[in-house]
Image (spheres, rainbow, N blue to C red):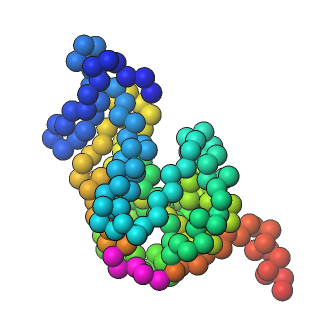
Amino acid sequence: MLHSDDFCVKEEDGTLYGWSEKNQRREGLGADDKNGIWICLKCLEQCPCLKVFMAVMEEKGMFGSKMADMRFFEDSLYVIEPDSPEGGNLKHELREIPCASAEFIDAIQPETHGFKIIDGKGTDVLALKINGLKVSGVNIGAGCYRPHKDDEYTIISDLQQCLDYILFVIHTTHKRYPHKFKTDTQKWVESLS
């Protein structure tokens, strides 16, 4: 995303957006990934023992997650990806593939914290699951609206809600939540045994 020389971020009524005064126009924030990075850094400030995985080329087919060294995740309890558009949503089934155990979803209480469970599309969590991630993973709305567009914006309260919720999960969920990716073929074969 190219910005004008005078690009700046403006806040208005609890919303962040990119602006060029010289051109009198809105310009995209890049918030689709930046909101998640901000959340990860804020979590690391409070919980320095966390591990953060930032994959390259997520927007170009999740290349980094598809090629990840899965040994990085061997001691992970679960994976949370703050990269879903908009706010107040949690995705644990991506492209109709379950990515988290029911036990994990029960433990993290999304509805109690104002998050609606919705179906999702391809994300790094799904790519990691297909690549062999052995724990539950979810993708959470991080407050970015109209991603990759010039009129992209962030609702600050949605961004904060995502951060607060992830910190709640970190502080209250201390056990490992295994979950294995299964293809439709594997499910069919197992049903015959």
Q: Nearer the viewer, residue 43 or 2?
A: 43
- Check residue 172 for magenta coloring: yes
Give the residue displayed 46% in from the left and 59% down from the top.
Answer: 52
Residue 167 in the image: x percent, y percent?
32, 68
Q: x, y (%) of residue 162?
A: 33, 59
Q: Left or right: 41 with respect to 20?
A: right
**From this viewpoint, which residue is outermost toward the bottom?**
193
Answer whether residue 95 is visible to the viewer in this image.
no
Q: Is residue 121 magenta?
A: no
117 relative to 101 in the view: left or right: left
Instruction: Please report the residue visible at 40 percent of the width from the left and 36 percent of the height from the top.
Output: 30
- The image quadrant where one finds the N terminus is top left
Q: Up-down: is 127 above or below 73?
A: above
Going 42% across and 30% down the picture, which residue do you hit?
A: 149
Q: Which residues are magenta?
A: 171-175
Give the residue at the far top of this rendering: 22
Which x, y percent locates residue 166?
36, 66
In the rendered image, which quarter is residue 48 located in? Answer: bottom left
Q: Give the quarter of the figure containing the C terminus.
A: bottom right
At a point 31% along the width and 72% down the height, the residue shown is 168
- Front residue (pair 149, 49): 49
